[in-house]
């Protein structure tokens, strides 16, 4: 699946960026997504995510609730207007943002993959 959010040819296009500081969630989720043939970059912090967004242009950013602030998401969308944001967990911090997708935790990988395919 091609990354759709990029307009700048200098960035590496990827399907997904996974942002979570929970290694017990990040590593297996990354493996499952790669097994489904998604191009994935995973990072363990907000700072690493913002740094990697200077190198990569994802179609979807999967964010653990609280890993990136709503203000950061707004800034990311200014840079990449077509990027889709999928929050894992509750929507309490992000309920005021438009066009945010949610998936409950604990993650069900089949539901996660279906949700990603729907929003792509």
Image: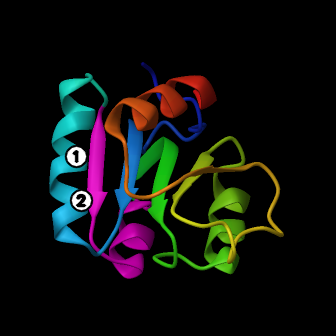
Give the image location of residue 105, x and y in percent.
44, 58
Which residue is label 1 attached to?
30
Q: How is the image coloured?
A: rainbow
Residue 44 visible? The answer is yes
The 10 Å Cα crowd at callout 2, few under 14, some 14 to 19, many 20 or more, is some
Residue 120 vertical placement versus 29 (above, below): above
Q: Image point 62% across, 63% down: which residue?
A: 76
Give the number of the disc on residue 26: 2
Element type at marker 1?
helix
Q: Image point 36% across, 55% down: which residue?
A: 18
Identify which residue, 47 or 113, lies in the foreground. Answer: 113
Residue 12 visible? The answer is no
Q: Is residue 120 magenta?
A: no
Residue 102 vertical placement versus 78 (above, below): above
Residue 28 vertical placement versus 51 (above, below): above
Q: Image point 77% across, 49% down: which residue?
A: 99
Element type at marker 2?
helix
Identify which residue, 86 or 60, lies in the foreground. Answer: 86
Judge left or right: residue 103 versus residue 32.
right
Q: Which residues are magenta?
A: 39-54
Q: Image point 29% across, 42% down: which residue?
A: 40
Q: Quadrant of the N terminus?
A: top left
Q: Is residue 41 magenta?
A: yes
The 10 Å Cα crowd at callout 1, few under 14, some 14 to 19, many 20 or more, is some
Identify which residue, 27 or 56, lies in the foreground. Answer: 27
CB under 8 Å between callouts 1 and 2? yes
Alpha carbons under labels 1 and 2: distance apart: 6 Å
Give the image location of residue 84, x and y in percent.
62, 44
Q: Quadrant of the C terminus?
A: top right
Asked where in the image residue 47 lies, by quadrant, the reply is bottom left
Judge left or right: residue 25 versus residue 61.
left
């Amino acid at each position: 699946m091609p990354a759709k959010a990029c307009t700048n040819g200098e960035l590496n296009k990827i399907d997904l960026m996974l942002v979570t500081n929970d290694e017990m969630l990040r590593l297996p989720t990354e493996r499952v997504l790669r097994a489904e043939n998604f191009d994935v970059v995973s990072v363990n912090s907000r700072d690493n995510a913002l740094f990697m967004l200077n190198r990569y242009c994802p179609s979807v950013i999967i964010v653990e609730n609280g890993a990136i602030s709503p203000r950061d998401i707004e800034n990311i969308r200014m840079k990449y207007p077509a990027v889709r944001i999928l929050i894992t967990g509750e929507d309490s911090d992000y309920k005021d943002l438009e066009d945010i997708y949610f998936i409950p935790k604990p993650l069900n990988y089949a539901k996660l993959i279906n949700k990603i395919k729907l929003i792509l």
